[in-house]
Amino acid sequence: MNIPVKNDKLRAWIREVADLCQPDDIYVCNGSQEEYTSMIMKLTETGIAIPLKKRRNSYLFRSDPSDVARVEDRTYISTPSRDDAGPTNHWIAPGELKKIMTGLYRGCMKGRTMYVIPFSMGPVGSPISKIGVEISDSPYVVVNMHIMTRVSTGVMEMLDGGADFIPCLHSIGAPLEQGQKDSSWPCAPLEKKYISHFPEENLIWSYGSGYGGNALLGKKCLALRIASAMARREGWMAEHMLILRLTSPEGKQYHIAAAFPSACGKTNLAMMQPSLPGWKCECIGDDIAWMKAGPDGRLHAINPENGFFGVAPGTSYKTNPMAMDTLKENVIFTNCALTDDGDIWWEGMDGDEPSHAIDWKGRDWTPQSTGEAAHPNARFTAPASQCPVICGDWEKPEGVPIDIFIFGGRRSTVVPLVYEAFNWEHGVFLGATAASETTAANIGAVGNLRRDPFAMTPFCGYHMGDYFQHWLDMGDRLGDRSPRIFYVNWFRKSDEGKFLWPGFSENSRVLKWMCERVDGRARAQETPIGLLPAKGALDMTGLYISADDMEELMRVDRQSWTEEIPDMEQHFSRFGDRLPVRLSRQLEEFKKRLK
Ligand code: TSX
Ligand code: MN
């Protein structure tokens, strides 16, 4: 077979994979409009993609009911030494895992086309960007990669010129026998699914799933798990963070990167529009930040992605109007409901629910039906460039200088609205102990406290203790040019169970205080947990919250914080002797401040 590829490593890899997987055809993608359109047309003809009358060039896909989310129990960090993967990752020895998966890959693309997808994570040619090549037998993956990454002939030209790349092998694990009828979402059963990472050779192997983070390998697999391991080796950072630019009425720009566990509204904050007059907020990214020290000694961030792969249910004009306006055309929807007039729908959308729809499993649905119309993890895939508040500099190759890091979680009690870390090391302690209460979006019981350090638990490609140390090292390197670190909780409730803070656009008041702290203009009061806004320091103009509610929102109760300590100690004990001494000292100092 003639493969139009000049890069020797890539040619050899394509040959090797084709020999193993035995596809009927090989197609090398160029990322063009025509390619996207022709693939979508084929998917439409076979009934796999459902065109939406109400949204131009937009399509609905329905996954197999067993293939609806990332499979963390089947996700592996395969380092030669088990200890190097750490306590938060699943591990199988590279030799053993490759043997198992090679067996699965043998002949797995029979009856299918093998697509070769060259892509850039980050603007093509940026010094912070990386090239990947995904080989996949899923046309759904190809069209999603077109939106979520930069697939282009420019990338192939760089590869032809000898550029290095990260190989990402993907198969849905469903070969077709001669004459066998295909299903609309072929995949393998759970026990044959493997999402594998070999960080010491920058390699990704995924088998058996066609969904999201299991299959679009540029995102969680490359841009977080593999990139985090590369970043540690190379002295930069790959973080599970949104990036936004806030501009003050005076025109001063502040760049903020924020990490939250799932179900805290990260995409909503990334596109938030300030309620404070004169303040402007622009989106740079909603999920991942790659950051490197620039020539100015400051930390510069890029969004390695090209689109948003967001959770649809709960997204509305009330919670995120800018996302809703991003979704008007050129969107792929997965596992949303289909309305009778040819539009999508999901729980939490504005307005009345439809009196009839087709649910995510393809069955008739009415408000009287027992289950949801859209799957709770239903997704939209949309180009970032379509976001009305995408920042003009979002593709700047050198990135934007980060002033502020925010960590946070969902806590109905104990944790106040906002506080600032005393210093970088204390900020790393806040990130390392970040916790969130589980919601219906998590598996297991609702309302349990779960530690999710830096929101990286499922995404760190190496030992979490070493990751904490890398954060400390970055602070040492950046010195007085380090971003300031804050912790927020939008979700504190009153005794009556009412949210104390209105959230959403009103969060701009909290962000404004952070900016003023950076400029040395806002007052803070010292407490055992950190620096809280002094009385009157939060701009509350035009927002009424009773003095009692405000007091409760900001309250730091020594007793309840003391009750958190055993859980923090247990959490830290997981990391054994790889827990940096500076963090155990932070915990000891915290205990002393609480006395
Ligand atoms: O995304 C959220 N943010 C950040 C927004 C920029 N959510 C949604 C979380 C689920 C993904 C929030 N929910 C936020 C928030 O700041 N705050 C809350 C809690 C809340 C919910 C509703 C109201 C007030 C607070 N008020 C009314 O419904 C009227
Ligand atoms: Mn994410």
Image (cartoon, rainbow, N blue to C red):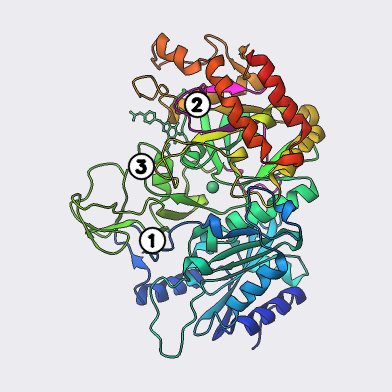
Q: Residue at x 54, y 63 (%)?
A: 215
Q: Quadrant of the N terminus?
A: bottom right
At label 3, which amino acid type do we have?
Ser
Coordinates of residue 132 in the picture (x, y in percent): 66, 63
Return the residue at label 1.
58
Q: Residue at left 43%, top 70%?
A: 40
Above or below, comparing residue 84 to residue 141 in the picture: above
Is residue 394 on the magenta stretch? yes
Q: Which mark is residue 498?
A: none
Q: Nearer the viewer, residue 287 or 260?
A: 260
Residue 332 visible in rendering: yes
Lateral position of residue 205 relative to residue 449, left or right = right
Q: Identify the residue position indicated by label 2 in the image.
A: 508
Residue that extends furthest to the bottom in the rendered view of this protein: 178
Answer with left or right where residue 305 lies relative to residue 580. left
Task: Tell me whether circle 3 and circle 2 mark residues in contact (CB < 8 Å).
Answer: no
Crowding near the residue tagged with mark 3, few <14, some 14–19, many ≥20 C-alpha atoms within 10 Å: many
Mark 3 → mark 2, Cα distance in angstroms: 19 Å
Q: Is residue 122 visible?
A: no
Instruction: Report which quarter residue 337 is drawn in.
Output: bottom left
Q: Please, is residue 52 above or below residue 377 in the view? A: below
Residue 333 coordinates in the image, percent (x, y) = 40, 58
Helix or strand or loop: what does disc 3 sit on?
loop
Q: At numbered mark 1, what does the secondary structure look like: helix, strand or loop?
A: loop
Image-quadrant location for residue 67: bottom left
Which residue is found at the position 68% from the left and 69% from the top?
A: 96
Which tag is nearer the camera, tag 1 or tag 3? 3
**Disc 3 designates what residue?**
316
Determine if the C-beta at disc 2 is less than 8 A from ligand 1.
no
SS for callout 2: helix
